[in-house]
Image (tube, rainbow, N blue to C red):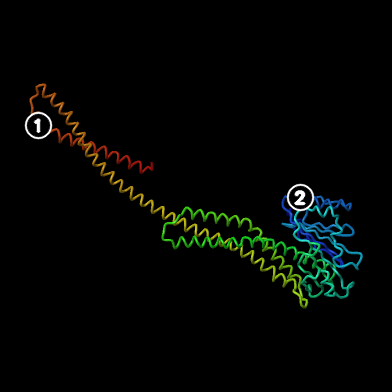
């Protein structure tokens, strides 16, 4: 047996749909928890058991569903947030839809100390056609504090859903679900889809303020890059290449830092948006006359926001590539400038080498003359010494004949030495020394 076989089977059942009766009251919290807060959040959840004399779980898991008698609480752990769904069936059916909520079942001390940041908080009132034969629209609107409503008939008309997608005076959102002909299991699945739509909607919109903030800066970057490109292509005067390269490096650093900050958030927005669309499709909505459906509302408001985030992300990628191309062009221009300078330098060095070679030949000629002069002088002393000892010869003739011999000998010796140095230099060059 594969060691992960049991785990793989259990994964499909790790987040079962709830069975929710009607009427009932539900409160939902989605809390963003950082990596350093996850252990603290789990320990805080375990502490809830002590208020109701329960036995807390030993290890953390993806989903916990606990029945504490007068209410149930379900904790789901996600990548970026942890959700709590509290379900309570009211005893008094005459109480208003949102006058009593499931959060009242939790200890205030425990509720106020949950680690993390609340991103979604809303109440769901589930009513049944058996207790309320018909919903009056004016009554419904009064429970949403007169706000404009979004309504639909999901599951092919077996239920009605009303919401405003706004925060109310208690700081929470509100959903009213009117169950006409759904079983408790069907109702549980539909409620799960509704709360996921609202949660994923908010998580998807987290990137929008970031996208708007960076969008204005990207416009300035575009203009700056366009100006640099125009200067490179149109300028007839020498440019400060060092300053331009420094400017491009600063722009590239800003773009890469911005991409690092936004890449995950924009990718998450795309993923959450796809989940929202999938849940909306599963609702199988019919319209309510005179009101936007949830799908229509989301398509009109959420989809453009997600496209804005996608556009800013693509703009960052495009700007990064354009900066790279301009930088390559700038580097090519700098290399060509360096090559031109090197060519001029080599030409100058070649000219100086020729001058030095001519001077060297001149010096060598003068050296031959000087060495010959001193050599003839020394030879003259030798000839005079021999003549003074009584050897009879024409002293002036011998000295005169020695001059061309000495000059020729010095010249040959100089040439041999020069040739030897050239051979040594060539040998070292071949060896790469």
**Where's the N terminus, which quadrant?**
bottom right
Residue at coordinates 48% horizontally, 57% vertically from top-left? 328
For the image, the number of numbered tags is: 2
Task: Give the image location of residue 78, x and y in percent.
Answer: 74, 57
Q: Which residue is mark 1?
A: 397
- What secondary structure is found at the residue carrying circle 2? helix
Res. 365 image quadrant: top left
Q: Is 406 situated above or below 281?
A: above
**Where's the C terminus, which quadrant?**
top left
Left-right relation of 370 to 80: left
- Residue 416 has which mark? none
Residue at coordinates 59% horizontally, 63% vertically from top-left? 314
Task: Give the image location of residue 61, x and y in percent.
Answer: 78, 54
Task: Give the image location of residue 207, x and y in percent.
Answer: 67, 61
Q: Which residue is more in the foreground, 220 or 307?
A: 220
- Which of marks 2 and 1 precedes in the sequence? 2
- Residue 39 has which mark? 2
Q: Which residue is more in the foreground, 224 or 14?
A: 224
């Amino acid at each position: 047996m594969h060691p992960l076989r049991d785990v793989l089977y259990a994964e499909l059942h790790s987040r079962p749909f709830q069975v929710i009766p009607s009427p009932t009251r539900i409160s939902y919290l989605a809390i963003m928890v950082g990596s350093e807060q996850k252990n603290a959040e789990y320990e805080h959840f375990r502490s809830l058991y002590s208020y109701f004399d329960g036995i807390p779980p030993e290890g953390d898991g993806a989903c916990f569903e606990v029945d504490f008698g007068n209410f149930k609480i379900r904790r789901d752990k996600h990548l970026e947030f942890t959700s709590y769904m509290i379900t309570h069936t009211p005893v008094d059916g005459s109480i208003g839809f949102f006058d009593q909520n499931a959060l009242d079942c939790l200890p205030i001390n425990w509720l106020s100390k949950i680690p993390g940041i609340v991103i979604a908080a809303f109440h769901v009132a589930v009513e049944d056609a058996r207790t309320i034969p018909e919903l009056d629209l004016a009554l419904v609107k009064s429970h949403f504090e007169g706000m404009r409503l979004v309504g639909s008939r999901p599951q092919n008309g077996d239920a009605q859903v009303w919401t405003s997608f706004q925060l109310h005076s208690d700081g929470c959102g509100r959903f009213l679900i009117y169950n006409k002909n759904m079983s408790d299991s069907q109702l549980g699945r539909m409620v799960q889809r509704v709360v996921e739509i609202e949660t994923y909607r908010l998580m998807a919109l987290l990137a929008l303020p970031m996208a708007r903030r960076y969008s204005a800066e990207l416009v300035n970057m575009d203009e700056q890059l366009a100006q640099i490109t125009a200067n490179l292509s149109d300028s007839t005067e020498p440019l400060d290449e060092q300053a331009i390269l420094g400017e491009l490096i600063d722009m590239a650093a800003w773009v890469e830092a911005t991409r690092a900050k936004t890449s995950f958030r924009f990718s998450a927005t795309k993923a959450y948006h796809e989940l929202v669309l999938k849940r909306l499709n599963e609702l199988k909505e019919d319209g309510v006359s005179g009101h936007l459906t949830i799908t229509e509302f989301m398509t009109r408001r959420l989809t453009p926001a997600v496209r804005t985030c996608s556009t800013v992300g693509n703009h960052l990628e495009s700007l990064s590539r354009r900066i790279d191309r301009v930088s390559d062009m700038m580097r090519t221009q700098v290399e060509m400038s360096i090559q031109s300078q090197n060519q001029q330098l080599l030409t100058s060095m070649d000219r100086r080498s020729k001058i030095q070679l001519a001077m060297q030949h001149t010096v060598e000629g003068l050296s031959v003359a000087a060495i010959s002069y001193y050599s003839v002088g020394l030879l003259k002393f030798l000839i005079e010494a021999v003549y003074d000892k009584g050897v009879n010869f024409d002293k002036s003739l011998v000295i005169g004949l020695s001059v061309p011999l000495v000059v020729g000998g010095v010249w040959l010796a100089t040439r041999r030495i020069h040739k030897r140095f050239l051979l040594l230099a060539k040998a070292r060059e071949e060896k790469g020394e």
